[in-house]
Image: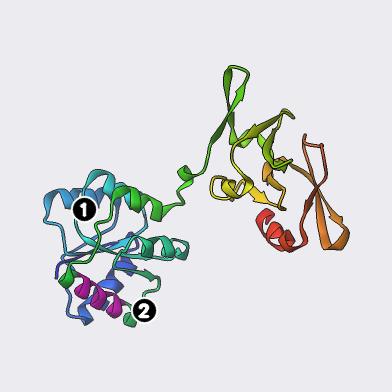
Amino acid sequence: MNVVIIEDEKPAARRLSRMLNDLEIEPIAMLHSVEESVNWFYNNEHPDLLFLDIQLSDGLSFEIFEEIDVKSAIIFTTAYDEYALKAFKLNSVDYLLKPIDSDELQTAIEKFKEIHTTKKLNTITNQQLKEIIFPNTNKYKKRFTVKIGQHLKLIPTTSIECFFSENKATYFCTNANRNYMIDDTLEELETKLSPELFFRVSRKYFVNINAIKDIISYTNSRLKITLNNYCESEIIVSRERVKDFKNWIG
């Protein structure tokens, strides 16, 4: 089994190498940066298995895959566990959090051997690797198109203060205090709006965090929100959403 370690912290790389030696595996190379890794892959046969740290000294490891179509199976090694779920969804061999545990390492190696034997490992694409390294914000809408007479107008999502439903229709209000009707329901917007930017405070409203002017305690353990421009009706955070809302504004 040919193994390569890509790890910018040399003590961590040496420790992983010793742990692999205990499993009778001798890494054929230890690489410490994006530049060094790219040069190595250009000039060497790709290994069976790659231990890949996500953040390297000269950039993120996905930059290696911008230059090289790496054919190796991957075991991710990093201290950042927020990437774990996405890594598993891509059917990478495994995901090891630092400091690496010897039993978990052995389990990962055995898992690789089983997958390698049955050849069930999916090939990871460069785009998929990017989605591991940082959240894919491209899936959220950056603008909405509205029709005004015979004209179409593009409204950036960042300029929208809130989305709301009224008389079975959905509208949004901009920071210029203009309302526009759209075809999406509030339920459909759940997957189209960035959760960092918008929060559904009630069945009727989504609000933009950057448009919040004031938050006031309200009856029945609820909260009342005032936006910079929208003022057509009260925006109340429903009681069951108050806790999540407070976490969201953080």
Q: Main secondary structure of the magenta part?
A: helix
Gap in angstroms between the C-alphas marked 2 and 1: 26 Å
Q: Which residue is mark 1?
A: 70
Residue type at mark 2 is Asp
- Comparing 12 with 43, the one in front is 43
Crowd rating for badge 1 (residues with CA inside 10 Å; few <14, some 14–19, many 20+): many
Q: Residue at x 47, y 45 (%)?
A: 139
Residue type at mark 1 is Val
Left or right placement of residue 170 versus residue 28 in this view: right
Q: Secondary structure at mark 1?
A: loop
Q: Secondary structure at mark 2?
A: loop
In the image, residue 95 above or below residue 60 = below
Crowd rating for badge 2 (residues with CA inside 10 Å; few <14, some 14–19, many 20+): few
Left or right placement of residue 90 versus residue 221 in this view: left
Q: Which residue is mark 2?
A: 101
In the image, residue 226 above or below residue 133 = above
